[in-house]
């Protein structure tokens, strides 16, 4: 593999239904990979280098000292990558495989090309997926299945943030539209604290984790609108967390309605039932409205409400992800209604995005 050079692409994602509830064991969500990508160029090198020119990091060298991954300068934007490298290096060490120096260059098309504003397409998850796929591919004797990529990315993500469902990682790794139920972060941490190796963790069945593919019914068009406002997920998740602790009955009722909506949505996709899809999206929207009222936080902002109300004239729509800004999603019955929906969005100051569901997850091109 002298002179090795290859490229990795990983898609962004949009949540379709099941937001917030998906962090609870057994509560499902529907998430879709979209055709905007993180692209990674990998080249043989004499030292370990990362380049992220779009975020002002032309070159960042890294090394391993006493088992710890260290970059040559401190930048919070490198934390996800640093933890991915640490998890990967631990796996290399377990398998007695030497580290191969690589120069990895990361470019993104997940944000607005004119302003650089984020759409909320899961760039951190896509970068993690692509970086780990690249590292596994570059080292002979390492597992390079999508399950291995997903699980390594999930561990690295948890080490960085301490929580999260992993739904965005699943979309980037597996591609397509997925029904997804999350693993338990506390189980992962307890296994690691008990001395479980990364190799053992990859081989184990993770409790509650479930991933299955879904398909759009024929003639049903997936649409995305952008409000023009980016949002920080952390504070909103914190407010929902306080509700979870303080008002268990309200929170439980939300989980039940969200789960019923997602289960019906997945069944409607499988039965090619467009009317059922519309009904399920409306039901999940109602569950989120109930949640935001109880938590005193704006999941469905005025622009997102307008986006969803307009979508209801042509099919059904709702906020996507944590809400508070970013994107909303909709489904319309046929190209004509989809075009009318997008025109109505534009008239209301909402930007339709030319996004489609990406069938391919993370992929390697030699």
Image (cartoon, helix red, strand yellow):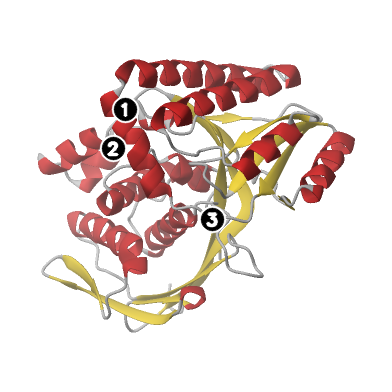
Q: Position of residue 204 (x, y in %)?
A: 27, 33
Q: Answer with mark 1 or mark 3, whichever residue precedes in sequence.
A: 3
Check disc 2 and report its element: helix, strand or loop. helix
Residue under the point 10% across and 69% down: 66
Check disc 1 and report its element: helix, strand or loop. helix
Of residues 77 and 197, the one drawn nearer to the viewer in this rendering: 77
Q: Nearer the viewer, mark 2 or mark 1?
A: 1
Check disc 3 and report its element: helix, strand or loop. loop
Count of residue discs:
3
Q: Position of residue 297 (x, y in %)?
A: 44, 38
Q: Answer with mark 2 or mark 1, whichever residue precedes in sequence.
A: 2
Circle 3 packing at 10 Å, graded few (<14), some (14-19), many (20+), is some
Horizontal side of residue 362 vs 344, given as left or right: left
Asked if residue 132 is positioned above or below residue 360 in the image, the reply reads below
Quarter of the image where the C terminus is located: bottom right
Would you say the residues marked 2 and 1 are in contact, meaning their CB atoms lie under 8 Å apart?
Answer: no
Q: What residue is shown with label 1? A: 244
Q: What residue is shown with label 2? A: 203
Residue under the point 27% across and 25% down: 246
């Amino acid at each position: 593999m002298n002179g090795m050079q290859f490229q990795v692409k990983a898609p962004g994602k949009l949540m379709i239904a099941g937001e917030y509830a998906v962090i609870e064991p057994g509560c499902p969500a529907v998430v879709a990979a979209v055709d905007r990508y993180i692209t990674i160029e990998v080249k043989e090198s004499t030292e370990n280098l990362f380049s992220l020119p779009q975020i002002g990091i032309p070159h960042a060298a890294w090394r391993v000292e006493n088992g710890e991954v260290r970059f040559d300068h401190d930048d919070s934007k490198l934390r996800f990558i640093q933890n991915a490298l640490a998890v990967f290096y631990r796996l290399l060490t377990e398998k007695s495989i030497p580290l191969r120096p690589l120069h990895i260059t990361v470019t993104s098309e997940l944000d607005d090309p004119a302003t650089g504003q984020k759409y909320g397409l899961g760039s951190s998850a896509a970068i993690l997926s692509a970086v780990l796929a690249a590292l596994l591919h570059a080292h002979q004797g390492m597992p390079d299945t999508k399950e291995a990529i997903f699980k390594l990315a999930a561990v690295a993500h948890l080490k960085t943030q301490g929580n999260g469902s992993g739904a965005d990682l699943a979309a980037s790794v597996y591609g397509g539209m997925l029904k997804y139920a999350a693993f338990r972060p506390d189980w992962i941490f307890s296994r690691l604290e008990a001395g479980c190796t990364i190799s053992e963790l990859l081989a184990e069945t993770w409790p509650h984790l479930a991933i299955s593919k879904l398909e759009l019914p024929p003639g049903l068009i997936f649409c995305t609108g952008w409000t023009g406002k980016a949002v920080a997920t952390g504070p909103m998740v914190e407010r929902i967390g306080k509700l979870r602790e303080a008002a268990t009955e309200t929170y439980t009722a939300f989980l039940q309605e969200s789960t019923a909506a997602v289960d019906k949505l997945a069944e409607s996709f499988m039965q090619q039932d467009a009317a059922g899809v519309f009904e399920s999206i409306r039901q999940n929207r109602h569950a989120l409205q109930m949640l935001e009222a109880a938590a005193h936080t704006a999941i469905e902002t005025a622009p997102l409400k307008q986006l969803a109300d307009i979508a209801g004239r042509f099919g059904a729509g709702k906020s996507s992800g944590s809400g508070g800004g970013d994107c909303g999603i909709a489904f319309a019955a046929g190209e004509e209604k989809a075009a009318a929906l997008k025109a109505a969005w534009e008239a209301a100051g909402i930007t339709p995005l030319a996004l489609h569901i990406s069938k391919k997850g993370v992929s390697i091109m030699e």
